[in-house]
Image (cartoon, rainbow, N blue to C red):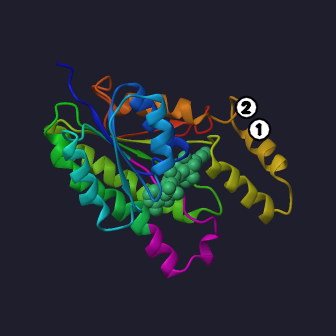
Amino acid sequence: MTERKVAVVTGGSAGMGLATARELARRGYDLVLSSRDPQSAAELIRSDFDVQIKLVAGSIADPGLAERLATASEALGGATALLLNHGGPPVKPIMALTDDDWTGAFQTMVTGPLRVMRALIPQLQANPTGRVLAISSFTVKTPFAGIGLSNALRAALVNALKTAALELGPGGVLVNALAPGYVETDRIREWNESYARQENTNVEEIRARTLETIPLRRYGTPEGYARLAAFLLSEDNDYVSGQQIVYDGGLVVAN
Ligand SMILES: NC(=O)c1ccc[n+]([C@@H]2O[C@H](COP(=O)([O-])OP(=O)(O)OC[C@H]3O[C@@H](n4cnc5c(N)ncnc54)[C@H](OP(=O)(O)O)[C@@H]3O)[C@@H](O)[C@H]2O)c1
């Protein structure tokens, strides 16, 4: 009998989350697909792949989401892989951020992902190839002006995940983060539009300027990101843990 593979994917309805869910389905994983509105993404995946998909709608910041995800994956036989993802926080100068901005973003970017992980760990530990991966950002390595929430809170999550890799390694669970550079999704289009407005220029100018900073002179693709993510989440990854790997066309060469 082929062994069941079950992936829980949060933020799985668009962009890199959806691309990774699709890649996992292509590799035969049953899915628990979650986001605030995952319905149409699930239909897309079902139309292409013959896998079971359970939908769990809700924000990762919602305290009740974690248990609902664990119940859904248990019903599929138990999670073997967990992808932690959500949308990016607002673009705002750091001195303009209020206490409420910080508290709200902390719920989405730190407390929520760690709560989901805590709920899923018993299932991941029960499986010989339990894997956790979080979508992070290259700005953890080289902070970027205007996105202080992302720079600071993703760094907090990445170090929490490195701690988890140390503590969960003896139980066989591998934990990593995969940081995108510039990847062609709605988020990067919004990001470029936001910088264009701030600088009173057009999106093409911002895009051309960012391309100059990327050695490969092109943005990455959600599908390229997804292939690397699916590798890190699978049994093919037998020894990479506690890392933040970048998918960025050579943009970040610092440690
Ligand atoms: N694209 C890039 O180049 C780039 C670069 C660096 C970092 N990042 C970061 O990488 C992550 C993924 O980026 P992307 O470009 O793939 O984003 P995207 O295309 O905007 O997709 C974001 C996904 O997260 C879901 N989501 C949003 N808020 C959520 C919440 N509170 N709880 C659960 N799910 C939520 C969205 O679905 P619903 O609307 O249905 O909830 C959607 O499925 C983001 O955090 C982004 O900031 C992206």
Is residue 203 at least partly visible in the picture? yes
In this picture, residue 116 sits left or right of residue 36: left
**Corner quadrant of residue 244:** top left
Question: What x and y, as percent, mark residue 40?
Answer: 51, 47
Report the amino acid beneath label 2: Arg
| Residue at x 48%, y 29% (from the top left corner) | 48
Q: Residues within 10 Å of mark 2 (few under 14, many from 20)?
A: some
Question: Residue 86 bears which disc, if any?
Answer: none
What are the residue bounds of the magenta stretch? Answer: 84-105
Give 70 or 246, whichever is nearer the viewer.
Answer: 70
Disc 1, SS: helix
Q: Residue sitting at 38 percent across and 28 percent down? A: 50
Give the crowd class for mark 1: few <14, some 14-19, many >=20 residues within 10 Å. few
Question: Residue tagged by mark 2?
Answer: 217
Q: Amino acid at mark 1?
A: Glu
Q: Position of residue 4 (x, y in %)?
A: 22, 29
Q: Magenta span has 184?
A: no
Mark 2 or mark 1, which is nearer the start of the sequence?
A: 1
